[in-house]
Amino acid sequence: MLTNPDILQAAIQDMYFGSDPMRFFNKFDAIVYDEFHFYDDLSASGLLLQIKIIEERQPDPKILLASATPNEEFVRFLRERIGLTVRDINSEFDSEGDQFRHRMNVRRHEDRKIIDCRDEIGTELQDKIDAVNDYDEPQIVLVFNSAKDSNDFHDFLYREHPTVFEHTAKDNGFDTNDEAADLDETEFYILNTTNKGEVGLDYDITTLYMEKPFTASAFLQRFGRAGRQSEATVDIYGLGKGPWGENVDFPRFAEQIYKGLESTQMDQNRLADLVGFRAAYAITEREESSSWFNQELREDFETNIDKYDQWYGFIQAVNAEYGEIKDGFSPGKYQQNSSEAKLLEFTTECFKTFRGLRGRSLPASIKYPRGDQLGVTTYDLSTTLRNYDIMDVDDDDTLILGLSDDDTLSTVTARLPAYETEPTKYDQPTTEIEGLLQTKIHRHIDLADLNDDFSVSIELLHRFFDIIRIVDAIIPSRITTSEYDIEINCDTNGPPEIDVQARQI
């Protein structure tokens, strides 16, 4: 069976209705996870829980984790925290076999972004297009760190280099749900992509322009797209000179990249907390449901998960205190607008990040400029509005977007559940928004500690927000731009519903 871990995680987290989807784990005694390094801590905790359940249910399971840049901490967690027998399957070098890595000429640039050098690169691409006669096999790839820059460069080629644009295909996150963007149905010589193209591209790439990603494993995945079938030239932006020397073999280069860039190895204690919370939340959601569930599931989630009891007790305590918020004339310890009530409401809302494998998002139907046409796709609205302005709204609430000023981000504020009266600036880079939200929530936790009647562990509250990314856990209840108010309703069985209205100014 071909599937993805998101589907398996939805079954674990009780997101399906009807017959018991957990029966899936009874039917297979072997499973292959491809490119398992690709998952961050939150997603990896889901994979770990899936593997643990398969191991519990099968007498001799065969689990294969495949990656050219494996995350050793992930593997160590399976061995030490879950107790699985793990062995490596390594390839051996065959001097008479097919060559898997060809000579690469690397040019390093201090500039961090390709878009900052677009005129120079556009001219180089024009020269390369003029020098060939056959354009149906991809040979040039540009890999950006952001979909916004990828889109902007595509629009730049359309305006300034129409011949290059004619032979260029774009495939970033915006194109995933765009029915008009299908690489399988397109002949192209140049590919414009993002980290979406780091895994799986197997073209004969002879020229690669790439921005330095944030981690070493991502760098090597991206860098490894070129030089697979013939010699290649790679321009790396944001890397600088470094200690690599003039003539370095690939293993040595990879070793230096791991030393020089941020490590992608996972924190064992954080991973243990995430796995334990996932398991505890899966049981709690079933207990709170009105439907019956097979009690044998407790064996799946309780056995060999050392943080399960801690987080199960924490969730129970938060839910019990949440029930103490007064509703109308009902009794309770907390008024609805009290700081404790807001903290409890916000926390339970953040629990929902564990319903899926990768956290939560706010999908919206959008039309955006992609060179010669408006692309129609579905993309996360919070991210989109940091880079694009809403120009108009279709009758079906499809947002028609236009490019923002190159030098300034769009003006966006968000109201978050329980804190609707405290707008948060959402027109900043994600890391800055996360830092701001983390500072705020830990301050609110310290205030709750001053109330002797507050019966939730302050230590575990701090720890909970330490192990999650709030921007991935919370969906705003309202987003405001310079010209539009967007109300968001998450109280549905499906994706969040949005209502877009022009602001009355």
Image (cartoon, helix red, strand yellow):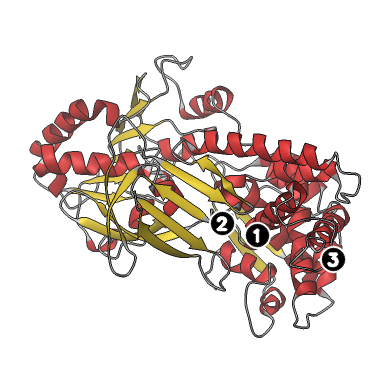
Give the x, y percent position of residue 168.
20, 47
Graded by Cα atoms within 10 Å as few (under 14), some (14 to 19) or many (20 or more), the crowding at tag 2 reads many
Mark with earlier residue (2, 1): 1
Front residue of 236/466: it is: 466
Indicate the amino acid at tag 2: Arg
- Reading the image, the residue beneath label 1 is 352
Task: Give the residue at mark 3.
Answer: 331
Image coords of residue 310 (percent x, y): 87, 52
> Is any part of residue 323 visible from this angle?
yes
Mark 3 → mark 1, Cα distance in angstroms: 27 Å
The label shown at residue 360 is 2
The answer to whether 217 appears left or right of 336 in the picture is left
Q: Is residue 480 above or below residue 49?
A: above
Q: Secondary structure at mark 2?
A: loop
> Gap in Å between the C-alphas at discs 2 and 3?
33 Å
Picture layout, residue 447 above or below residue 123: below
Disc 3 residue type (three-letter): Pro
* Residues under numbered marks 2 and 1 in contact, where contact means CB atoms less than 8 Å apart: yes
